[in-house]
Structure formats: structure tokens, C-alpha cells
Amino acid sequence: MAAVQTLEKRVMLEMLRRMLLIRRFEEQVVRLVERGEIVGAAHSYIGEEAVAVGACLALREDDYMTGNHRSHGHPIAKGGQVKKAMAELFGKRTGLCKGKGGSMHLADFSVGILGESGILGSSIPTAVGAALGSKLQGNDRVAVAFFGDGASNEGAFHESINLAAIWKLPVIFLCENNQYAVTSSFKVMVSTENISDRATAYNIPGVLVDGQDVMAMYEVVSHAVARARAGQGPSLVEGRTYRYFDHSLGLGRIVRAPYRTEEELEQWKQRDPITIHTELLLSQGIATQAEIDQMEAQETQEIEDAVEFARQSPYPDPSELFEDMFANPIPLE
Amino acid sequence: MVQTQVQARPITMTQALNEAMREEMRRDERVFILGEDIQSGVYGASGGLAAEFGKERVRDCPLSENAFFGAAVGAAAVGMRPIVESAFCFAWVAMDSLVSQAAKMRYMFGGQVNLPIVYRLSLYYGGSMAAHHSDRAHPIFMHIPGFKVVFASNAYDAKGLLKTAIREDDPVIFCEDRTVLGARADVPEEEYLIPFGVADIKREGSDVTVVAIGGMVPRALQAAEQLDEEGIAVEVVDPRTLVPLDKQTILASVAKTGRLVTVDMAHKTCSAASEIAALVAMEGFWSLQAPIQRLGTANVHIPFSPALESLVYPTAETIAKAVKATLE
């Protein structure tokens, strides 16, 4: 790939670092959910890391993103605070959202993470609005909306693309097609062969990318970002990817009929995004195995520290129940 | 209620809303409007604003309410101050953006973001618009935490409340009752703001308290006028904002009169009238000398035929009857 030669080594290493950070984070979440230390629903991003990391590294820190229910990876990819993300999953007051949001509602406005929505497709108009804000304020910040194949069937997706297209807003609609909405295949639920094909209806570019290839994601999203910054309007990018776990952790126990095969899962695991990128770094001489091992150890430690931070953190005080409802508070009971 | 202003002119509520937006858009360039057909101003209140502020700040939107109600959230989250112009009947298709995003975002994200958005929503009713276009959904937004809910009954209040709403850092549902949009009231030339959470006593009286909102206020005043001739002194309280609700003024009035009628153009069940009745039952019970009368729209859909529609809403006559019931 042409980009390999020109891309800074620093960025290519950062891709691996952030993917590893997400993987380790999510592996810990699996354990913590099993142990009951994390309660509620948790949706694993393992297998899809290259999509968020490739896309977010194509952004600046002051660009915006919105996420969805399966969004532990996006804040990490965007440079959000990992310890606070873990503490949020624990429901602790040191969490990103002071324990009021949890797994499906991470937000870190300090780095443009405008929050995640558990109602799918619902945060896409938010990203469009942020992009409208950029346009009205005369700055060149772009917004990326991350959503899945399932959400591409929501009205909010279609309304939002049309709105962004007619106003030429700097927004990238980033569909992470992990191929299943809970147990429903996009091949059954989507009328076009590719979700990116839907861009044609809105007269904007639509690009299908190998979502396991972080370099490809970075290259395509960089191009979409450049277009957006130049005032040329929105793009739809489909990263074709796969989730290794079921829709939510523990759901496998209650799924009565198999919706995908072991063979399919194994085939996708052969195309693991971290393995693909690690091999690239080694084969291109960008990193040695020793350097990669060291990076892995570092990221593993960072996540262990985050878990410990979360464990040790206090729960919110009952007095915080009524806080944060309004900027200009009113009596609540 | 009588406002003693030096330079006051009688203008309609539509004109008052237009003035409020014009003044706030001049004052703060972050304020902009999203809505359907607002550049042409066919619905009145936004008329002429595009000519002064341009099409970037007075943005005509496609029929995609969920997208532009939600885009207002995103724009507010990055520092803009959007006004959305629409109607309750169209808000249904935007409920996801309203409920899942506008209402919940600040709390869910631990107070990281302020959302200064005004959703200006019209209530069309009483005009043979039939079931789809006659919705009066303000109680639903009282029920969902996260909104401030404003309900003006006249041009003076509308202007002062809308200016406050535009400067508010929280999402506001601003109810515009089309039965009173054309009514004139004296509105001063000078700038003024009306704070949220301050009810206004539209008429003083010592026998029975009537709490009414929006277009129900003139009907309550008409009933009070009729009853005055029979020697019954009715006090008419207009909360002006339903969230926050000025409990003190309502409870103080009931403490004086001992009798309460609540009037709402929403369906009776779970209406603003129900909520105010519950408040007084809980916190003003020992003041009451008679059961509370709660008036609202019959729990049927709004029929098209004027012969039927005229039966469903509270009127001056039904209000007067309810007042008398508290005196029996």
C-alpha cells in the first residue's frame, strides 16, 4: 500500500498501541462482567479495533465524534481518558460521566467525544449538528458518527445523511459493519449489497473498506476528512469488520438458535486487526518484536492500573443523584 | 398583571415572538433557527428574520424532524444556541432526538455539556385540524426530566419568556398556543425578561383559585368575568412555566381561597392540570374546603367535525361550572 511508505512511523506505532489498549481493556471487561464487578450490559469491541483506531487517528484532537452502545473502543481510539472510562463502567464517581452513564454512554468532551447513544442511530444527528456548529462558527473541525450495520436501517441515518449532504457539512458517517444486529445478518436486513452503496442515494461518496486493516481505514478516513475540511461535504465510509463476541457479553447463553457459524468466526479471527498490523510493522522494519512486546506489556499494565483505579474509586454519593440535570438547576424531587 | 410601561404597543403574540428572536439574534451571534419554511415565514413568527440574519442563521430544513431536532443537540453541544421551530404534532417523529438526546444528554454524561436549545412547538387545536394536527403534548415534556417547559398565554409574557428561554443554558420546550397567537397585548419597546418559575396572577379574587395555562387563561378570565356578576370572586393564576413550577404562588392562592380548579387543554389524564391538582392535594390539603376540580380535554382523539370538536376542550362555561361546583 502506497500509504505505508509515506505514513510516519510514529502514527503506525500509535495505531498498534491504541488497538492493543482497546483489546486489553475489552479483555478485562469480559472478566469483570463474568465476576460481576461490572454490572448492566456490556458490548465487546474485540475484533473491530482497526475501525475506530484507523478513523480516529485521521482526526485531530479538537474534531468531534459520537459513538454507540458498542463504544468502549472509540473513546480510547480518540484519546480519551482510559482510567476514567473504566471507572465509568464500574459506576464510580471518578468515571467520565461520574457514574451516571455507564458502558453505553461514555463521553469525554475534553477531546471531542460528544457521547454515545444506546438508542441506535440516535447519535448520528448529534454529529451532524456538531458539524453544523463548525460551519456556523467558521472553523474546520469535522465530526465522525460511528454506528453499525443495524443503525443504518434507522430513519435517523437516512435523514442525517440527506441533511448533511444538502448543507455540505463536514461529517463522516462511519458505518462499522460487523455484520450482525444482535442476531440479524445485514445480508438479510439491508437492501443493498454494501451499506456504502447507500451513499449513492444521497449524492455523496460511499467507500467500502477492509475494517480489519487499520492502514486502509486510516487512508480512507483521512481522505474523507480532507474533503470535509475543504468544505466538500460528507462521506459515508463502511468498515467491513466482525465482532468476536455476541451482541452483548453473556448473550450467547440465551441465544436459542445459532445465527453464525464457528467457521465464519474462525475465518475472521484469521484476519485479526492487531495481528495484521503487527505483521506489517515487523515486515516493514518499523518495529522489532522486542519493541512490540514492550508496548504490549505497557498497555497491559495501563489497563491493569485502570481497573485498580476503578476498583479503588468511591461510588457516587447519594447527594449526587439530583446533580447534573440542569446547567441552571431547579428544585427536583 | 397590569404592566405600567412608558412605551407599550398592542402587538400579537406572533409579533412578540418575532421581536424576541430578532433581539436575541442581534445580541448573540450563536443564536440561530432551524425549522421548516422559516425563511418564507409562512407560520408567522420567523417572518423577516432571514432578510436580516441570512439563510445560514435562519435555516430552512427538509421534512426530517428527527434529524434537525437532533442536529440542534449537536450544535448546542459545540457552543451554538439553536432555536427549533416546529409543532407538537411533528415532535412525535423527533421524539428520539428529544428524549434520548436533548433531555438525557447532560445528566447521562455527568454534566459535561450544556444544551442551550429552545424547541418552539405550536399547539394547533380548536381549528378543525383533526386528530393528527391538534396535539397538546406539553405534559409529556413535564413528565420527561431534563426539559424546562414554558407556556405563555399572551404576547407580553411570550416575549419576555422567549428571551429568557434563548438565554437559558438548558433545553426548553416553548409551547405556542395558536388559539392566542393572534391576540394583542401591550408590549413595551424596552427590553424586559421574565424569569422562569414565577407565576402571574392574572386576576385577583378571594373565593376560588383557577390555575390555567396558555389559551385556557383567557377562557378562565372570561369565566371569572361572568361569575363576578354573580358575586363570585375568582383568582386566575397563570404558572407561565410548568417546569419549573411556581408552587408557592399556587399554594398561597389556594390558602387564600380554599378552592381550586385546574384547567388544561391537554387530555385530562396525566395533564398539567392533574399535576397541579396533585401538588395542591399533597401540600395544600388543609387549605381546601372542597374537592379540587380538574378540567382538561376529553380522553378521545380530536374529531374533525366542529360539532364534535367543540365538545372536547374546556370552555369559559365549563370553567364557570367547575368553579361553582367547588362552592356547592
Image (tube, coloured by chain):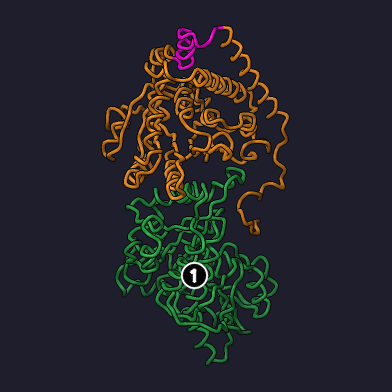
Q: Give the residue type that dot 1 points to.
A: Asp
Q: Position of residue A288 (x, y in %)?
A: 54, 7
B209 in the magenta segment: no
Q: Magenta-highlighted stretch: main secondary structure? A: helix
Q: Is residue B27 above or below residue B235?
A: above
Choose top left, top right, bottom left or bottom right for residue A330: bottom right
Q: Was residue A275 drawn as part of the magenta stretch in this picture?
A: yes
In this view, the residue in front, A46 or B225, is A46
Where disc 1 sits, the SS reads: strand
Q: Chain of mark 1?
A: B
Whether residue A310 is visible to the viewer of this picture, yes or no, is: yes
Residue B189, horizontal then vertical, whole percent: 50, 78
Determine which residue is flagged by label 1. Answer: B264
Display colour for chain B? green
Q: Residues within 10 Å of mark 1 (few under 14, many from 20)?
A: many
Q: Which chain is orange?
A: A
* Residue B295 appears in the rendering: no
Q: Quadrant of the C terminus of chain B?
A: bottom right
Residue closest to the eye, B102 or B224: B102
Residue at image position (49%, 37%) is A63
Q: Residue at x 48, y 21 (%)?
A: A245
Image height of B17 relative to A98, above or below: below
Q: Which residues are magenta?
A: A272-289
Relative horizontal placement of residue B15, taking residue B160 as reference (left or right): left
